[in-house]
Amino acid sequence: MDPSSEIDYDARLAALAVAFAQGLADKHAAIARCWRAWQAGDTSARDELRALAHRLGGAADNYGYVALGEAARALDALLIPRLATPAVGAAAAVAALLDAFGLPPEAI
């Protein structure tokens, strides 16, 4: 293996991790916005909230944000359409996910 390709790979991973971390504030805001919209009666916001949680749950662990990923996956599972989760049942999961944004990445 060419040593320079390993460096390029490491540099690309580091750049992706930085980009992920820099995008967390926007993700937090989008999740909070969807939650507020759902609470205000916008039923389509529930689907958008689930999509955001699903994507975040799939990506967070890759960058060391284990607790954030777990919280996102918990919300995603709670919002599966066939479960028809009432907003009250999702409140704790949304709060836990929003709180998890404040946690530093864990060592992986």
Image: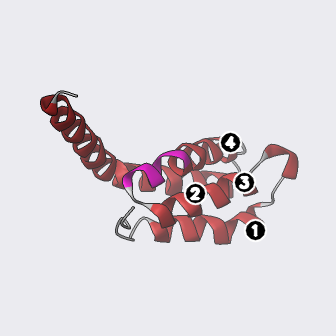
Three-letter amino acid code at the position of disc 4: Asp
For the residue labelled by badge 1, is the local secondary structure a helix, a strand or a loop? helix
Image point (33%, 47%), residue name: 20
- Residue 39 point in image, percent of width and height: 67, 58
- In the image shown, does 15 or 101 lie closer to the viewer? 15
Three-letter amino acid code at the position of disc 3: Ala
| Magenta stretch secondary structure, dominant | helix
Whichever of labels 4 and 1 marks the residue nearer the N terminus, that label is 4
- Residue 104 point in image, percent of width and height: 34, 69
Image point (57%, 70%), residue name: 95
For the residue labelled by badge 4, is the local secondary structure a helix, a strand or a loop? helix
Q: CA distance from mark 1 to mark 2?
A: 17 Å
Q: Tell me the residue that label 1 is attached to.
A: 88
Whichever of labels 3 and 2 marks the residue nearer the N terminus, that label is 2
Query: CB of mark 2 within 8 Å of CB of mark 4?
Result: no
Query: CB of mark 1 within 8 Å of CB of mark 2?
Result: no
Image point (35%, 55%), residue name: 25
- In the image shown, does 29 or 98 lie closer to the viewer? 98
Q: Tell me the residue that label 3 is attached to.
A: 77
Q: How many other residues sit within 10 Å of disc 4, few (<14), some (14-19) or many (≥20)?
A: some
Is 93 drawn above or below residue 48 in the view shown? below
Image point (62%, 55%), residue name: 73
Magenta stretch: give its range. 58-63
Is 45 drawn above or below residue 29 in the view shown? above
Whichever of labels 2 and 4 marks the residue nearer the N terminus, that label is 4
Q: CA distance from mark 4 to mark 3?
A: 12 Å
Whichever of labels 1 and 2 marks the residue nearer the N terminus, that label is 2
- In the image shown, does 17 or 85 lie closer to the viewer? 17
